[in-house]
Amino acid sequence: MQLTARVALFPLLPYRVVEIAIGMADPTDPSDSPKAAADVAGAAIPSDVVPHDEADDSDAGYDSATSTRASTSISSSVRDYAFENSRRYHKFQEGRYQFPNDEPEQEREDMKHAMVVHLCNGSLHYAPLEKPQRILDLGTGTGIWAIDMGDEYPEADVLGVDLSPIQPNWVPPNVRFVVDDIEADWIQPRESLDYVHIRHMASSIRDWPALLSRAYEALAPGAWLETQELRFELECDDGTLKETNQVAEFFGNVKKGLDVFGIDLLSMLRNRQRLVDAGFVNVEERVFKIPLGTWPKDERMKTIGLYNRSMVQDALQGVSIKPFIHGLGWTMEQIEVYLVGVRRDLADARQHAYIPFHVVTGQKPGVKGK
């Protein structure tokens, strides 16, 4: 029996719940049953995994922990966490992601989601989707985007994948989450997806061409892929941004620290060309301006700027710990002293800075359904 750490993203079995696949079963070997594979890995397959037509569909709203038990009955090692300087990090594939996954960080990620949706006038995507049936959210985080998509497209199966099992149990019945490393090999069936969504992953992905190639293979002809990324560089259109602005310097230091881990924080600058190189057509890039603070006169943009400033403010310590300590060789004391000046410039409304937000969409060639 050969165990793997892969996840069968969309199982072909007509089950109502998604199983976290710890091992790949060999149908010719009785010891390679899903039950045996799960037991070896330290997890048990729940008894409430039943065919959809035999399931209890009395609750047409949100599923409780009962119906999501198959998605949460996973190896205890996946649920372990690592801790550093009073912040909590993922333990599964430890070191792949350099930022915390604790409650303060989850709240910040949800605030970032609200900011982006407000910026995009309520839109969850820009790809022109037509009745998508299978949606994959890579690096789902708290799962908030996947949950919103499940509500918007109740006829679709929405799957969120992340290194951390931090998603809620109460979700729409068409939304599932699994723990996996999206940069590892995929076993997703070819041409089985209608839409792949990748958001806020520039600070995590080491090999974008490989990831986009796997997504291309998994997408059906005519299906879409979309990336949405903040570009953490400060820009200004009226000359009020000082050359000594420490928020801009902070972003630069985070980039230098992540470079040590093989991650390019500004990788979104090449996403449009990467989609073209991967074979996508109808590739389009949109760039938005997100104010840093409440300096805009427009009330809508002022609100978005408040979200952005709060999101950056809450990120300063958690985002800096690993890149600064393990990447740049700083101490925690040096970080805390340094952040005093960063917070001061962050609060300076006289500097009219903004952060660009890049949205790239691309379509796999071919006709859907053929």
Image (cartoon, rainbow, N blue to C red):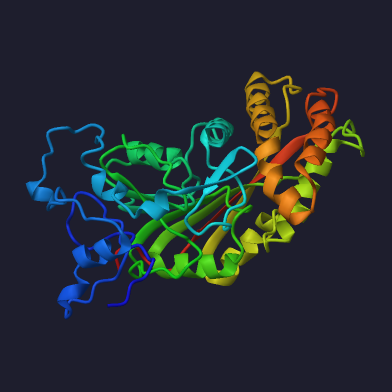
Q: Name the outermost residue toward the left.
A: 54
Q: Name the outermost residue toward the bottom.
A: 28
**Which image quarter is the N terminus in?**
bottom left
**Which image quarter is the C terminus in?**
bottom left
Give the image location of residue 126, x and y in percent.
50, 46
**Image point 67% across, 58% down: which residue?**
267
**Image point 86% across, 32% down: which residue?**
238
**Image quarter for residue 85?**
top right
Say left or right for 170 vs 202. Answer: left
**Image point 60% across, 67% down: which residue?**
207
Image height of 316 relative to 233, above or below: above
Say left or right for 51 vs 328. Answer: left
Give the image location of residue 116, x and y in percent.
57, 36
User: Which residue is at the front of the view, 336 or 289?
Assistant: 336
User: Which residue is at the front of the view, 65 or 149?
Assistant: 65
Give the image location of residue 233, x and y in percent.
76, 45
Say left or right for 277 vs 125. Answer: right
Can residue 136 be seen here?
A: no
**Image point 46% across, 47% down: which residue?**
140
Image height of 207 relative to 90, above or below: below
**Image quarter for residue 120?**
top right
Can residue 96 be seen here?
A: yes
Image height of 186 relative to 120, above or below: below
Q: Name the outermost residue toward the right.
A: 243
Task: Please state the total of marks drawn on the protein image.
Answer: 0
Give the image location of residue 321, x and y in percent.
69, 44
**Image quarter for residue 311?**
top right
